[in-house]
Image (spheres, rainbow, N blue to C red):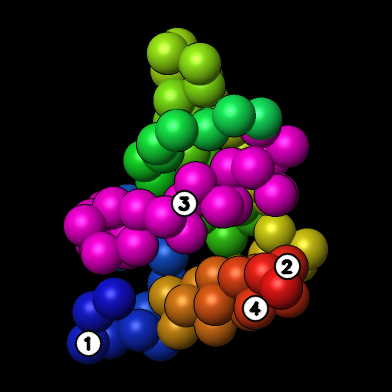
Amino acid sequence: MGEARGEAITAAVSDRICKHMNDDHADSIVFYAEVYGQAKNVSAARLLKIDPEGMDILAQVEGSETPVRVSFEKPLANAKEAHVVLVEMLKRSRP
């Protein structure tokens, strides 16, 4: 997710995180939309933006693009914390 992961979550950092997630972890984004965004029947999803309070996802739900907002339990301090929290969210909710 970038070399300077301790940096604040700016628009540029958000873009970098989104590109990485969309390119390498598309299945995780579907999972976030379904489990944390309560979206049902998600066939695909794209991470649009991440900020300290949450992430915006565009999910394909039964053929329609549906915006999904996933809020974090607490605001993120930086990009490194974003990485830790996103991985933790997967581990906590996957069997």
Indicate the amino acid at tag 1. Glu
Q: Which mark is residue 92?
A: none
Name the spot of residue 73 as percent of width and height, x first: 78, 63
Residue 72 vertical position relative to residue 33 in the rendered view, above or below: below
Within the magenta stretch, is there residue 7? no
Q: Earlier in the sequence, mark 2 or mark 3?
A: 3
- Looking at the rendered structure, the number of numbered marks drawn on it comes to 4
Q: Name the residue beneath numbered marker 1.
A: 3
Q: Which mark is residue 93?
A: 2
Q: Are marks 1 and 2 in contact (CB under 8 Å)?
A: no
Q: Which residues are magenta?
A: 15-39
Q: Are marks 2 and 4 in contact (CB under 8 Å)?
A: yes
Residue 61 vertical position relative to residue 77 in the rendered view, above or below: above
Is residue 48 rendered to the left or right of residue 67? left
Name the spot of residue 77 as percent of width and height, x first: 58, 76
How packed is label 1: few (under 14 Cα within 10 Å), some, or many (20 or more)?
Answer: few
Residue at horizontal 73%, vertical 67%? Answer: 93
Task: Give the CA separation, mark 4 to mark 1.
Answer: 24 Å
